[in-house]
Image (tube, rainbow, N blue to C red):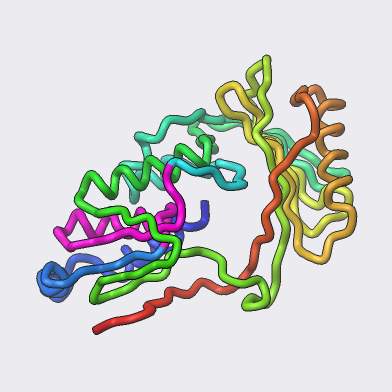
Amino acid sequence: MLLFLYIRQLRKKYEKTEKEKKVICQGKNMKVSILGAGPTGSTAAYYLAKEGIDVELIDKREFPRDKPCGGGLFNPPLFYKEFPHVKEIEGKYIYKAKFYCRKYFFDYESKDPLMKTCFRKDFDHFLLKKAMKEGAKLLVQKKPEPEGDIVINANGARRIKDYPEAGICLVNDFRIEKEIDTVYIHYGFHGIKGYAWLYPKEGYANIGIGAYLPQKSIKRIYESYIDFLEEKDAAHVQGKSYSAKIIPFSSIKIFILRTH
């Protein structure tokens, strides 16, 4: 989940020097409004609230809520070093993977977990509850009305036309009868500029495909990947349903909307 990379860079840049401690003291006399209570917003709120700063999270929807996502956290030990509370999230550890790229493939098995899988709805809700436990407040507003001295935009993607490139993701969590212990990642499946995947979860198989736009016949390619997994005896699922999401691509930027 790449959202943590934003926060990792912030934490490396702003270590607690004496100057930082003074900034924190000044911040305790201010109020921060964060637009968007997804993982980025909730994680920012968590660390601000831990420092005693007054934080309000504003989101358009109630929690828990779902979102199209693979639900895979790569290299869990690395993230636990920087975000120890993430270890508490319920999920399934994966130690084996199969990688495909056109006619090439290889198997890999690790003594340490390669991935921890979970449901996106549970992941987002967990991070929000951690922030609220530290003192952050959640406001559900269809039209945000921030009251903070500082407003941080963590709303995620804006209009697609605001970004230089975009992609599309088709994904679904399928119920399974037989547990799966191996991640499947298939780069360039059927010639797409992207990859297809199978992420095992407890009682489920998360199957998805992501590609740069424009991409013809993405639905047919998604269905073909499910057939491929059936042929490999990797997963046997009922139906070929999916949720779809347009994904904009841009360089990493942090937007401060307003300061007083």
Asked if residue 28 is positioned above or below residue 124 in the image, the reply reads below
**Residue drawn where x is 68% and y is 29% of the image:** 174
In the rendered image, residue 8, in percent from the top left (x then y), is placed at 38, 60
Asked if residue 143 is positioned above or below residue 82 in the image, the reply reads below
Image quadrant assignment for residue 153: bottom left
**Residue drawn where x is 48% and y is 75% of the image:** 253
Image quadrant assignment for residue 182: top right
In the rendered image, residue 30, in percent from the top left (x then y), is placed at 16, 72
**Furthest residue to the top?**
177
Q: Nearer the viewer, residue 88 or 17?
A: 88
Determine whether, in the image, residue 52 is placed left or right of residue 252: left
Query: Residue 243: within the magenta?
Result: no
Q: Report the span colored magenta.
A: 36-63
In the rendered image, residue 147, in percent from the top left (x then y), is placed at 26, 71
**Furthest residue to the bottom?**
260
Determine whether, in the image, residue 163 is placed left or right of residue 41: right
Asked if residue 149 is positioned above or below residue 215 in the image, the reply reads below
Determine whether, in the image, residue 127 is placed left or right of residue 197: left
In the rendered image, residue 144, in percent from the top left (x then y), is placed at 39, 67
Query: Residue 50: within the magenta?
Result: yes
Determine whether, in the image, residue 158 is placed left or right of residue 122: right
Q: The C terminus is located in which quarter?
A: bottom left
**Residue drawn where x is 43% and y is 52% of the image:** 39
**Residue drawn where x is 68% and y is 60% of the image:** 246
> How many numbered dots are placed on residues in this image?
0
